[in-house]
Amino acid sequence: MKRIEQIDALRGFALFGIIMTHMFEGYLASFTPPQYAGFNILLPIDSVSQTMIQNLFVGKFYAIFSMLFGLSFYLILDGKKGSSPLKFAWRLVLLFLIGYIHHIHYRGDFLTVYAIFGMALIPFRKVPTKLILLIGLFFALNGPSIVMKTISLIEPPVQINQPLAVRPNPIEQATAYFQLILDGEYKKLIVSNSTIGFVNKYNYLKFSGRLWVIPGLFLLGLWVGRKKWHQNIEKIPLGKLILVSAFIGIPLVLINFYFSAPTHSELVRYFGSIAKDASNIFMPLLYMGLLLHLYTSKFTQRYVRQLIPVGKMGLTTYVSQTAFGLFIFYGYGLGLLLNLSGTVALGLGFIFFIFQILFSRWWFTTYKYGPLEWLWRSLTYGKKQAFRLKK
């Protein structure tokens, strides 16, 4: 199957946004204990960086990555008549195992999440295209959470008195986890991530709405595949896509920014959260439209094409970004979590991403696949795959 350069470039672009987001957050993957609030705001410019990351990065780039995962499902399985769903399921089992190793080191891992939610895509092979779009939009816009929140505002749930001893204290949990990172307790971090880390991940997915949003984005990517847009990128009305997504997405970002302030009432913040969920669809569309537009220009295409190699080895790129982040912030590495300005961390993330571009360009002069991609592919087919390019 011939690779589509624009898709690899979009994947590389998504990975750029992901490392920038995680670097600013210190690869914490947990809410910050109150006593450490603002741990990365050390310079005046850090507040500006925080506003930029929270409003223009968080939730946007992972959305691009998720939609591309859904498109990959189509390319691997749904677009090849007669392909075995069992082989795709086995591929996801292997992704989960790779993700599990990643998760026990970094509980913000999304490979395990993708593997589990990816299984839910298999039954959608036979679902009509229009229905896939409708279900995808409802879930991607966090529809189930909005419905449940609306009901709770209209009719507040009955409070059930639970013994205090039974209730886990989230602040105590977050503080203990934060301290493990600072102390660099490697073995204890592995145990924590292997146990409570999975529980906290599920709670985060549920609280943030990503429990619904990620499958919805997968379905939107599948819908794009069904419509064959990846084969006819030149026919996509990029100008209209950019204008419409900007006209809708930018006001939504502003609404979320002003409505989500903790000083507002719960009802106002509720509307802010709806705006945020919608902006996490329209802003990624804007970003993708702009990148594809730059790709069509002879002047800028050469720069956009630099993203292709890192996108081509997306799994390796993502995991190596985590290794870099843990080395920078965690106590068993340099331990700079409390001593590194958020803006400086962004600079380090940018430099490392440039290194990844250079490394991946060099790598693909000799090899057909990225290291982890080759391992994943070999395990999928049950035999060692050709690795080096033929000279």
Image: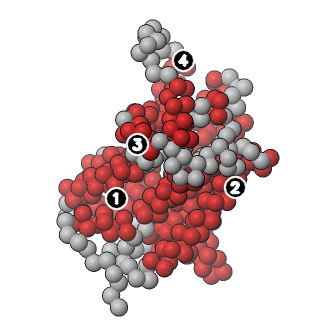
Q: Secondary structure at mark 1?
A: helix
Q: Position of residue 345 (x, y in %)?
A: 65, 54
**How far apart are the alpha carbons under marks 4 and 3?**
47 Å
Circle 4 sits on which residue? 154
Separation (CA) of disc 2 from disc 1: 37 Å
Please tell me which residue lies in front, 191 or 65.
Answer: 191
Of labels 2 and 1, the one closer to you: 2
28 versus 159 height, above or below: below
Three-letter code, disc 2:
Val
Q: Is residue 165 visible?
A: yes
In space, the residues marked 2 and 4 are separated at their CA atoms by 45 Å
Lower position in the chain sequence, tag 2 or tag 4: 4
Is the residue marked by circle 4 packed among few (<14), some (14-19), or many (20+) residues within 10 Å?
Answer: few
Residue at image position (44%, 34%) is: 200
Residues at badges 4 and 3 in contact (C-beta under 8 Å)?
no
The mark closer to the camera, 2 or 4, is 2
Q: Which residue is mark 2?
A: 344
Relative to residue 390, is residue 174 drawn left or right? right
